[in-house]
Amino acid sequence: MSALTYGSYLEIEALLSLQHPRSEGPEHDEMLFIVIHQVYELWFKEVLHELDRVVVLLSDGDATRASHTLKRVLTILKVLVSQLDILETMTPLEFQSFRARLEAASGFQSDQFRQIEFLLGVKREESLHRFAEGSRARVALERRFHEPTLWDAFLEYLSNEGYAIPPMLLSRDVTHRVPLSAEVQEVLLHVYRRDATNAELCERLVDLDEGLQEWRYRHVKMVERTIGARMGTGGSAGAEYLRSTLGQPLFPDLWEIRTKL
């Protein structure tokens, strides 16, 4: 058996063999486009890994470590935003030089990003149908679709802490978005006023919500800057669809209480 090395541990040879430009030449900027999106997928994998850990920590009643892990996720989101700065060094003409080679490939087909949305409560059944039945992506998304969300785990945690979370929310249909709840808002107000540890956990959830909204906004502006009002690849609505996702908080109860604190 050969000794473990940096290259073998990280499988560098395999990693560096995964970039395959399709344009003739190939066009210089296609390599950047491929690398950026492959790196995004790696970060999405890590975000899912960390958010799943948060759910476990909340189940264990460990608010301190859950807050720490959420802070890590927020830091990753900032990296995701900064990667758009790199992508925006590519001009519209440079992107058009190879865009036709993408054919039907589209960011809509990122099952890992859809998994993140599902875990955070943004569940759309139609998203499942973009992936072939029995495929790795479809199986993973179907599991996420039927699993409780991060917010459900948080409400269960608060209930275990002795807070009066409505039973109907603890046994709700998790395939639907969590509705606004006046009862939950009253609990959250009490947490902020009298429970510093759990108030910090609430603020980390707000950070996560705001961080994802920031990424969505920057993504929209990057698309508008690069392709304007054109249709996206794969027949998507491009920037028009992306704009429709803005301003939709993941955890609306945490935002609703701001005017009452």
Image (cartoon, rainbow, N blue to C red):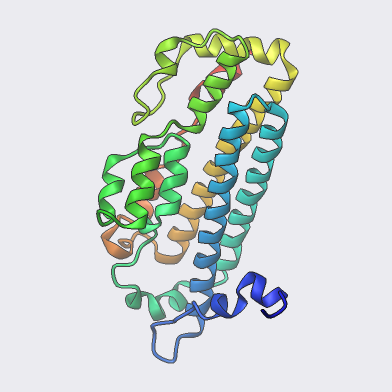
- Residue 204 is left or right of residue 116, and the answer is right
Query: 224 and 198: which one is in front?
Result: 198
Residue 154 lies, in percent from the top left, at: 55, 25
**Image quadrant for the C terminus?**
top right
Q: Residue at 42% x, 40% y: name it.
A: 118
Residue 202, above or below 238: above
Q: Residue at 57% x, 56% y: name it.
A: 43
Q: Quadrant of residue 72?
A: top right
Q: Is residue 68 visible?
A: yes
- Residue 64 is left or right of residue 53, and the answer is right
Residue 175, above or below 76: above
Q: Quadrant of residue 95?
A: bottom left
Q: Residue at 54% x, 67% y: name it.
A: 36
Outermost front residue: 1
Residue 246, above or below 58: below
**Image quadrant for the N terminus?**
bottom right
Q: Residue at 39% x, 79% y: name it.
A: 98
Residue 65 lies, in percent from the top left, at: 71, 34
Outermost bottom residue: 25
